[in-house]
Amino acid sequence: MATAYTISDDVFIPIDGAGAIPIKDIIPWALFGVLIAMICLYFVSTEQGAVSLFKGMYVHEFVHDGRHLMGFPCH
């Protein structure tokens, strides 16, 4: 005999806000995400320019197509 299954039996669907994440738990992860995004943006936009952290053209060549795709001129 088949058992009755409803959507309220699913443990992955929060009901009545039971699975809400507090803001104080989200803020550190949001700041970490912003930091990683800023580091990526630095490497795509300005590395191997007037201000560079690494010697040579390795970083420039690695992000070259992404640089043009995002509209940053590089040559």
Image: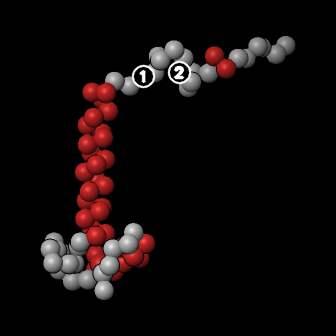
What residue is pinned by disc 1? 20
Residue 53 found in image quarter:
bottom left
In the image, which disc is placed on residue 53?
none
Q: Nearer the viewer, residue 59 or 27?
A: 27
Q: Is residue 62 visible?
A: no
Residue 70 versus residue 4 in the image, above or below:
below
Q: Position of residue 38 (x, y in %)?
A: 26, 57
Dot 2: few (<14), some (14–19), or many (≥20) neighbours within 10 Å? few
- The quarter of the picture where the N terminus appears is top right
Q: Amino acid at mark 1?
A: Ala
Residue at 29% in and 62% down:
41
Outermost residue on the right side: it is 1
- Whole-Å distance between the Cαs marked 2 and 1? 8 Å
Residue 38, above or below 60: above
Q: Secondary structure at mark 1?
A: loop
Q: Residue 47: x percent and y percent?
A: 23, 73
Q: Is residue 38 left or right of residue 53?
A: right
Assign a secondary structure to mark 2: loop
Q: Is residue 15 above or below residue 60?
A: above
Q: Are marks 2 and 1 in contact (CB under 8 Å)?
A: yes
* Picture colour scheme: secondary structure
- Is residue 42 visible in this depiction of the protein? yes
Residue 32 in the image: above or below residue 7: below
Left or right of 63 on screen, residue 35: left
Residue 14 numbered tag = 2
Image location (x, y in percent) of residue 60: 29, 78
- Residue at 25%, 37% (x, y): give it: 28
Query: Residue 66 sits in which quadrant?
Result: bottom left
Query: Which corner quadrant of the image does residue 29 belong to?
Result: top left
Q: Residue at x 26, y 43 (%)?
A: 31
